[in-house]
Image: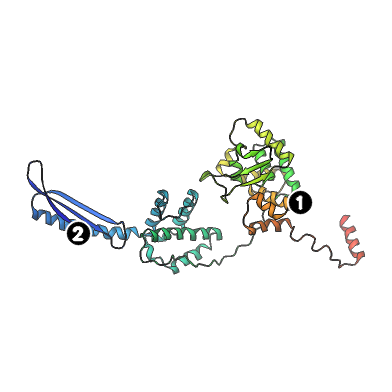
């Protein structure tokens, strides 16, 4: 607080008042007020008292407002945008996804002070969300809440909180594991045969997916600088998403995919001729950019009479075909870019290579009965 006197252009003595109020609990929360052209010291003191009252009131309001969960969530997003030192770095897509989850699932917290959200309330929210969301979405919601609290505590926006309220939460919901959809080798051949015959715009995309096991975004981002015709390899180091555009692969590391088949090498040479000076190896149909590639594939599969599968199933089909051809799982992992043995295990089970040869020695039925049933079956 300060009252200063000064001379105006006419030489008249006037007074200026400046008031500053800082929050004791929240670093960076400051209210400043000032007034000038006051003719007497008495007037200046009266104005100082009024500004003090206004500043105290505004500071109290700002301290309350700044701790509200809804405000905190928005400010966390803004802090991420400006790369605040206290913010844990996330991709743009993850921030958008987190915000969407937080605004829908924690809407009843919007006007609640963040330091009033305790473990009982946070765990109750997650438990309730398990009834309507998948386990993966609940885990993401927990991560989103954690991210906001971590930033709030580190930046001083949340006071008197020693532990993030979602820490220690145990998930109850157990989901039944779904059998991944895949195409057999014959079904894959049928798909490509019909697509080629009909000159379908997705033919080359589907073919390269089945020949390489690359993800949809990796195929989209594949350019000619990543194709080595001499060594017969593809260097997979980029991925495309509709949210973030072209960036690193999902695992954030590069890998090589062998192009040993003359069929796929021929396909790449055809594409090189037809694409001319285009940067990308594959055409980009509008449905791909819109993210509805699965619908296109499902509809085509239905029309030609093979199992209706989504786009990711082409990658799964590639893996299971290799495994059934006795390619070692560790090699398939390297080609597909899987680091998680649990993920790889699903495809090993699907291919059945981990149990093959284990029951052939069982001979329990009388020989005549076995042969009789075989004959009956063949009729």
Judged from this view, the residue extending furthest toward the right is 368
Where is the C terminus found, in terms of image quarters? Answer: bottom right
Residue at left offset 63%, top offset 53%: 338
Q: Residue 290 carries which label?
A: none
Q: Which mark is residue 325?
A: 1
- From the viewer's perspective, is the residue at label 1 or at label 2 nearer? 1
Query: Residue 246 at what x, y percent from top left?
Result: 54, 43
Q: Can residue 105 be seen in this view?
A: no
Please give left or right for residue 221 compared with residue 93 in the image: right
Front residue of 86 and 125: 86
Q: Is residue 187 visible?
A: yes
- Would you place residue 366 above or below residue 344 in this image? below
Query: Residue 163 at what x, y percent from top left?
Result: 43, 67
Please give left or right for residue 260 compared with residue 214 in the image: right
Front residue of 108 and 141: 141
Residue at numbered disc 2? 53
Q: Which colour scheme is used?
A: rainbow
Occupied quadrant, residue 270: top right
């Amino acid at each position: 607080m300060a009252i200063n006197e000064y001379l105006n252009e006419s030489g008249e003595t006037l007074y200026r008042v400046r008031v500053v109020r800082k929050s004791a609990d929240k670093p960076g929360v400051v209210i400043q007020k000032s007034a000038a052209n006051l003719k007497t010291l008495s007037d200046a003191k009266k104005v100082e008292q009024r500004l003090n009252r206004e500043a105290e009131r505004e500071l109290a309001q700002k301290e309350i407002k700044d701790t509200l969960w809804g405000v905190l969530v928005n400010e966390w997003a803004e802090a991420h945008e400006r790369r605040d030192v206290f913010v844990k770095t996330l991709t743009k897509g993850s921030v958008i996804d987190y915000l969407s989850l937080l605004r829908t699932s924690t809407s009843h917290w919007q006007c609640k002070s963040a330091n009033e959200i305790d473990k009982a309330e946070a765990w109750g929210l997650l438990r309730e969300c398990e009834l309507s969301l998948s386990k993966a979405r609940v885990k993401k919601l927990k991560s989103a809440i954690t991210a906001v609290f971590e930033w709030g505590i580190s930046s001083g926006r949340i006071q008197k909180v020693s532990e993030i309220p979602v820490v220690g939460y145990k998930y109850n919901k157990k989901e039944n594991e779904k059998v991944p959809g895949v195409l057999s080798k014959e079904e894959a051949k049928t798909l490509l045969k019909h697509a080629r015959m009909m000159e379908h715009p997705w033919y080359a995309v589907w073919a390269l997916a089945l020949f390489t096991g690359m993800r949809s975004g990796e195929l989209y981002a594949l350019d000619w600088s990543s194709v080595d015709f001499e060594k017969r390899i593809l260097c997979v180091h980029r991925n495309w998403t509709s949210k973030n555009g072209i960036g690193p692969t999902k695992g954030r590391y590069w890998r090589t995919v062998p192009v040993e088949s003359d069929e796929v090498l021929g396909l790449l040479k055809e594409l090189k001729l037809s694409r001319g000076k285009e940067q990308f190896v594959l055409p980009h149909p509008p449905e791909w950019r819109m993210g509805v590639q699965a619908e296109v594939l499902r509809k085509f599969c239905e029309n030609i009479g093979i199992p209706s599968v989504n786009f990711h199933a082409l990658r799964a089909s590639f893996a299971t075909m290799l495994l059934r051809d006795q390619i070692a799982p560790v090699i398939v992992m390297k080609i597909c870019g899987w680091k998680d043995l649990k993920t790889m295990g699903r495809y090993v089970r699907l291919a059945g290579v981990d149990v093959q040869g284990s029951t052939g020695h069982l001979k329990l039925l009388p020989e005549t009965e076995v042969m009789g049933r075989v004959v009956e079956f063949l009729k």
